Image (cartoon, helix red, strand yellow):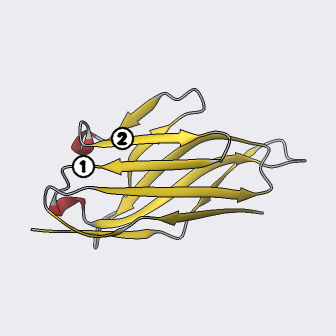
């Protein structure tokens, strides 16, 4: 089994910064893409940023220039540095990873439990 544990959410004022971290542990042979999603009340979950195993990245347009995703392939962690936060960034943020487990031939998607980010105006 694989577990993803997030940390770093909280309450911040408009224009502030937060750093989210996610650590993957368990039966891990390799990890392909790692990503952060978010879900605001009454809205669908959306992809915020993704980082591939080759370190290439993609961001949703609304966070480009403000958020930075990074990963540590030795520690199996992925971080999301969020700067210039806006009230519309308020959401529960979820970590996601595509993991190949030992004795498995296919990658499987795993999710963290979510961490609340609230940006006050």
Q: Which mark is residue 83?
A: 1
* Residue 15 in sight in this render: yes
Q: Secondary structure at mark 2?
A: strand
- What residue is rendered at 40% in x and 43% in y? 49
Q: Where 61 sits versus 80, above or below? A: above
Could you say where residue 39 lies in the image, as x and y percent from the top left? 35, 64
Quarter of the figure with the C terminus: bottom left
Could you say where residue 68 lies in the image, as x and y percent from the top left? 36, 41
**In screen coordinates, is 84 left or right of 22?**
left
Between the residue at mark 1 and the residue at mark 2, the CA separation in whole angstroms equals: 9 Å
Dot 2 corresponds to which residue? 68
Dot 2, crowdedness within 10 Å: few (<14), some or many (≥20)? some
Q: Which mark is residue 46?
A: none
Q: Where 88 sits versus 30, above or below? A: below
First-in-chain label (1 vs 2): 2
Q: Secondary structure at mark 1?
A: loop
- What residue is rendered at 24% in x and 36% in y? 65
Mark 1–mark 2 contact, CB under 8 Å?
yes
Q: Residue pushed farthest right?
A: 103
Dot 1, crowdedness within 10 Å: few (<14), some or many (≥20)? some
* Residue 45 in sight in this render: no
């Amino acid at each position: 089994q694989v577990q993803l544990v997030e940390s770093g959410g909280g309450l911040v004022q408009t224009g502030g910064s937060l750093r989210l971290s996610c650590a993957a542990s368990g039966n891990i042979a390799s990890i392909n893409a790692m990503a952060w999603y978010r879900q605001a009340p009454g809205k669908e979950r959306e992809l915020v940023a993704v980082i591939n195993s080759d370190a290439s990245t993609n961001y949703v347009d609304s966070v480009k220039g403000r958020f930075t995703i990074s990963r540590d392939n030795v520690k199996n962690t992925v971080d999301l540095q969020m700067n210039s936060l806006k009230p519309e960034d308020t959401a529960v943020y979820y970590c996601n990873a595509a993991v190949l487990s030992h004795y498995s031939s296919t990658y499987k998607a795993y999710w963290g439990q979510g961490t609340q980010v609230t940006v006050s105006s």
